[in-house]
Amino acid sequence: MFDYNFNTNRMAHQKAKPLLIILILLTGLAIGQKKEKWELDPVIQSALLPGWGQKSLNYQKRGRFYSYMESGLLLTILGTTTYSNILKKNYIAFASEHAAISSSDKDHKYWVDIGNYDSVRDYNDEHLRNREVSDLYPEDKRWSWDWDGNNNRNEFERQRILSDQMKLAATFGIGATVLNHMVSAIDALYLKRISQNKTLSVETWCQSETGSLGYTLTLQF
């Protein structure tokens, strides 16, 4: 009986040191989890700035991909929007010179219409024939136009269409940017769950026949 207690105590002391190390490790993990509560969640990070959450989870290459994508999209939006505005200013100035128009307070429909008809009279005549009275323009100084040649009208229309295309490209760029934020956030959530699935567990065991004590350390992925 004495021998049994002696062996058990001796083995317990032998196991005490590694068990203490494990307890310290587990305590460190718990402290780390508490600290993470004070940090911005990686999913929110990536939703705000694509790639940020991936980098905080130590997926640097993955994070750079989303960051480069974001930079490229922003540059595309800036470039196409700037070019569209420049073209718009140019075609308005061109129409003022070659179609004798008043450029103030005009909507997009007006610029489309003057590119398709040589004059306001031609436009009104066609819409009268089609009984589209609500679409008529007053034939006054504010709304009238009269192109000095088909070539100039066609050049105006080319610039106007290109400006609209650049504006549309900027709109698609905005949509792609929003999508990039969403995909990056979803990817960060996926990577976060992968990281959280790595769990450390400790199980003790005892063999009554031999009086042995032990433990099993398990790391799950």
Image (cartoon, helix red, strand yellow):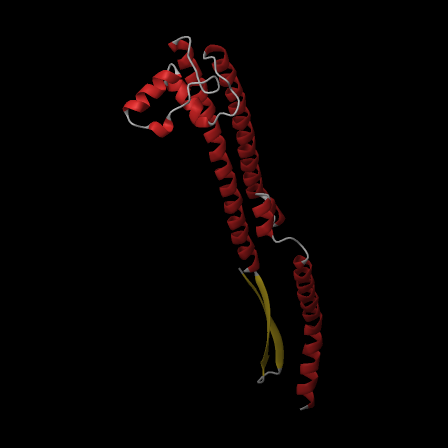
Q: Is residue 160 shown above or below 4? A: above
Residue at 62% across / 75% down in the picture?
214
Q: Quadrant of residue 61?
A: top right
Q: Is residue 191 shown above or below 3? A: above
Residue at 35% across / 20% down in the picture?
124
Q: Quadrant of residue 201?
A: bottom right
Residue 136 is situated, as x and y percent measured from the top left of the image, at 38, 25
Q: Residue furthest left?
A: 129
Q: Quadrant of residue 153?
A: top left
14 or 119, which is in the foreground?
A: 119
Residue at 71% across / 76% down in the picture?
13
Q: Is residue 207 shown above or below 139? A: below
157 left or right of 30 in image: left
Question: If the image is split into quadrants, where does the N terminus sit?
Answer: bottom right
Residue 64 is situated, as x and y percent measured from the top left of the image, at 58, 39
4 or 183, which is in the foreground?
A: 183
Residue 50 is situated, as x and y percent measured from the top left of the image, at 57, 43
205 left or right of 124 in image: right
207 left or right of 116 in image: right
Residue at 59% across / 45% down in the picture?
48
How many numbered marks appear?
0
22 or 115, which is in the foreground?
A: 115
Residue 87 is situated, as x and y percent measured from the top left of the image, at 51, 20
Q: Residue furthest top?
A: 148
